[in-house]
Image (tube, rainbow, N blue to C red):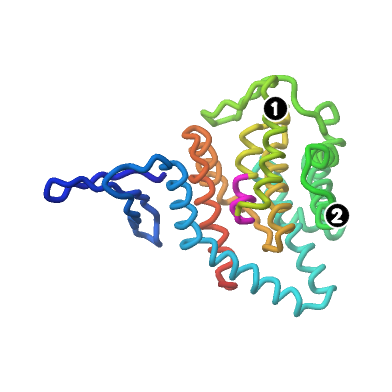
Amino acid sequence: MVSIAKRTVRGTTYYYLEHTMRAGTKFVRKSKYLGKEVPDDIERLQKEFLAELKKERWFEDFDSIRRSYAAEARSLPPSARDKLLREFSVRFTYDTQRIEGSTLSLRQTSQLLEEGISPSGKPVADVREAAAHQRVFLAMQKERSDLSLRLVLDWHWEVFKETKPDVAGKVRRHGVRIAGSRFVPPSPVELQPMLDEFFGWYRRGEAFLHPVELAALAHLRFVTIHPFADGNGRISRLIMNFALRRAGYPMFNIEARDRAAYYNALERSQLRSEEGIFAAWLFRRYKKEFARYV
């Protein structure tokens, strides 16, 4: 968070904007001089300062990732690109399902999705939801319409129509709690206005937010609204990758082994109402994942 610092030198007070950010294993304090008085438009200056720091620390590398990724994709024959996409769809389906409690292993998920072999002794819901999730993800790659509530409801319906038909594709009408979290999702009467605001914000964000930031914040905001009785995390991670793919950036898989850190970053952002906490968590992992392109 950007704060206002006051320093007094020889009886004269000077004001600065300050922000502490991590650089590797160290923390670095960045500052910007404001003057001898706090300007009236301080909120605008704080936002601009934070945007400058993000560009310096993250966005230039993200843009390098996009350029190198695009160049690599152009060099591959279509069949090779399709193979890489299907491989990603298996890993992404495995991890997004595993985060939510699926019992399928990566090998079982791969055999199911690539060879049509259903694992024995596993819950039918785990098998059907994994297969449905991959279908939705692959269909998303060809989607030409903008992100909308209708599109998201269709995704949710497709993922859960065989396992939870009573809630599939429907905005919840009852209160929910998140197991193990102190964050309490909004009440049902709040959901429609919040969803309307979310999709309006997303459309505006496509014009003024960096695509990786848009993806991170869209994930956070949607899962915080928590509009479904089940599947909010899975749909939020689909939205994240929808935003990345649409802007030409490599899609990102949050691995199940990072589940505790991932949930912790989400909860801290939600409880403190500080979106930057989760955004920074995702930025670090996104840059590490695609460091070869920088």
> Residue 284 location in percent, x, y?
51, 57
> Could you say which disc has been placed on residue 89 in the image?
none
Foreground label between 1 and 2:
1
Q: Tell me: 95 left or right of 18.
A: right
Kind of element beneath mark 1: helix
> What type is the residue that disc 2 sits on?
Ile
> Could you say which disc has been placed on residue 117 in the image?
2
> Residue 263 location in percent, x, y?
55, 41
Which sits in the foreground, 45 or 98?
Answer: 45
The residue drawn where x is 62% and y is 52% is 208
Kind of element beneath mark 2: loop
Q: Tell me: 22 left or right of 273.
A: left
Residue furthest to the bottom: 75
Are there few (<14), some (14-19), or many (20+) residues within 10 Å of tag 2?
A: few
Q: What stretch is highlighted in magenta?
A: 210-217
The residue drawn where x is 37% and y is 50% is 19
The residue beneath circle 1 is 193
